[in-house]
C-alpha cells in the first residue's frame, strides 16, 4: 500500500525556537497534502491543506505565520512551527492524497510527529 | 454542514464478544465514509471505506461496517473482539470543499478497550 513518512517522529525543543516537520509520500505523487493536529484523547483537527506549487489553505483559527507550510514538490510538504511555545506541544499528523486515474481518492496518513516544547 | 458523530467516548468489550462502534454522519450529497484506527503514538490507518455498492463493507483485521442511508449511520462491527483490537477508532466522511477540494471530517473518536 501507499506509504507516507514523517520526520522526525518526535522532537523536543526549547520555547522560542522553530521546528520543521517533513511529510513525504514515498511511492506516489501527492498534489494535495493535509496537516492535522491531535490533542490528547481527542480527534484530529485539520490545520491546513497544502497544495503543491501554491499557498496552503489554513483552517479558521490557525495562524499561518506561526505554522508555515511549504509544498515544494509532489512528494514533500513541510510544516514549520515558528517560535514554538509549550501550548504548541502536540501530535502532528500529515496525510497525502493519492488520486489514481479512474479510481477513488484515498488519504494516506503519516505516523505522526510528537512535538514537546519546554 | 458536514459532521460526524461518534456518541461513545469509550467502548468496553470482553475478548471473544462482538463489538460495535457507532458513527452517524451528516453530509451533502452521496457520502464517502471511512473508518480509521490509531494505535498509540502511531498515525491513522484506514480500516475500511464505503464509496458505493454493497452496504456491508468488509475491511482489515476482520472488521466490517454497514452503511445505512435512512439512519445516516456507518457503525463499525467485528464478530469476535481481540485484545489487540484495543485502539482509538475514528469515523470520517469525505466531502468536497469548493476552495480546497476533497476534505475529510472526523468524528471525535471512540476508544475501544478489549479485556481478556
Image (spheres, helix red, strand yellow):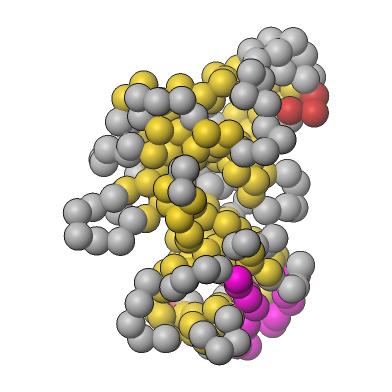
In this rendering, position of residue B38 left or right of residue B108: left
User: Measuring 64% from the left and 49% from the top, which residue is drawn there?
Assistant: A44
Q: Which residues are magenta?
A: B10-26
User: Measuring 44% from the left and 73% from the top, which residue is drawn there?
Assistant: B30
In this rendering, position of residue B13 left or right of residue A104: right
User: Measuring 68% from the left and 26% from the top, which residue is drawn there?
Assistant: A63
User: Measuring 52% from the left and 34% from the top, which residue is drawn there?
Assistant: A57
Whether residue B87 appears in this view of the structure is: no
User: For residue A87: magenta?
Assistant: no
Q: Position of residue B109 (x, y in %)?
A: 67, 62
Q: Is residue A93 above or below residue B81?
A: above
Q: Position of residue A55 (x, y in %)?
A: 46, 25
Nearest the viewer among A57 and B6 is A57
Q: Is residue A108 above or below residue A104?
A: above
Residue B91: quadrant of the picture = bottom right
Q: Position of residue B27 (x, y in %)?
A: 55, 68
In this rendering, position of residue A8 left or right of residue B48: right
Residue A20: quadrant of the picture = top right
Residue at the farthest top position: A17
Q: Is residue B107 above or below residue A75?
A: below
Name the chief secondary structure element in magenta.
strand
In this rendering, position of residue B29 left or right of residue A106: right
Amino acid at each position: 500500500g501507499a506509504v507516507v513518512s514523517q520526520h522526525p517522529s518526535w522532537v523536543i525543543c526549547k520555547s522560542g525556537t522553530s521546528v520543521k516537520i517533513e511529510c513525504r509520500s514515498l511511492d506516489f505523487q501527492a498534489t494535495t497534502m493535509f496537516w492535522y493536529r491531535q490533542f490528547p484523547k481527542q480527534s484530529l483537527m485539520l490545520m491546513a491543506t497544502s497544495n503543491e506549487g501554491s499557498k496552503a489553505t489554513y483552517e479558521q483559527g490557525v495562524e499561518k505565520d506561526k505554522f508555515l507550510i511549504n509544498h515544494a514538490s509532489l512528494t514533500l510538504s513541510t510544516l514549520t512551527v515558528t517560535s514554538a511555545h509549550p501550548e504548541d506541544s502536540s501530535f502532528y499528523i500529515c496525510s497525502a492524497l493519492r488520486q489514481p486515474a479512474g479510481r477513488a481518492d484515498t488519504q494516506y496518513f503519516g505516523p505522526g510527529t510528537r512535538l514537546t516544547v519546554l | 454542514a458536514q459532521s460526524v458523530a461518534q456518541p461513545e467516548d469509550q467502548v468496553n468489550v470482553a475478548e471473544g464478544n462482538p463489538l460495535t462502534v457507532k458513527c452517524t454522519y451528516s453530509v451533502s450529497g452521496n457520502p464517502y465514509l471511512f473508518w480509521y484506527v490509531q494505535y498509540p503514538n502511531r498515525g491513522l490507518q484506514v480500516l475500511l471505506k464505503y464509496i458505493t455498492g454493497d452496504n456491508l463493507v468488509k475491511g482489515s483485521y476482520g472488521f466490517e461496517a454497514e452503511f445505512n442511508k435512512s439512519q445516516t449511520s456507518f457503525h463499525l462491527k467485528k464478530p469476535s473482539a481481540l485484545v489487540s483490537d484495543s485502539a482509538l477508532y475514528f469515523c470520517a466522511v469525505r466531502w468536497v470543499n469548493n476552495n480546497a477540494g476533497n476534505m475529510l471530517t472526523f468524528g471525535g473518536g471512540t476508544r475501544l478497550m478489549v479485556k481478556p
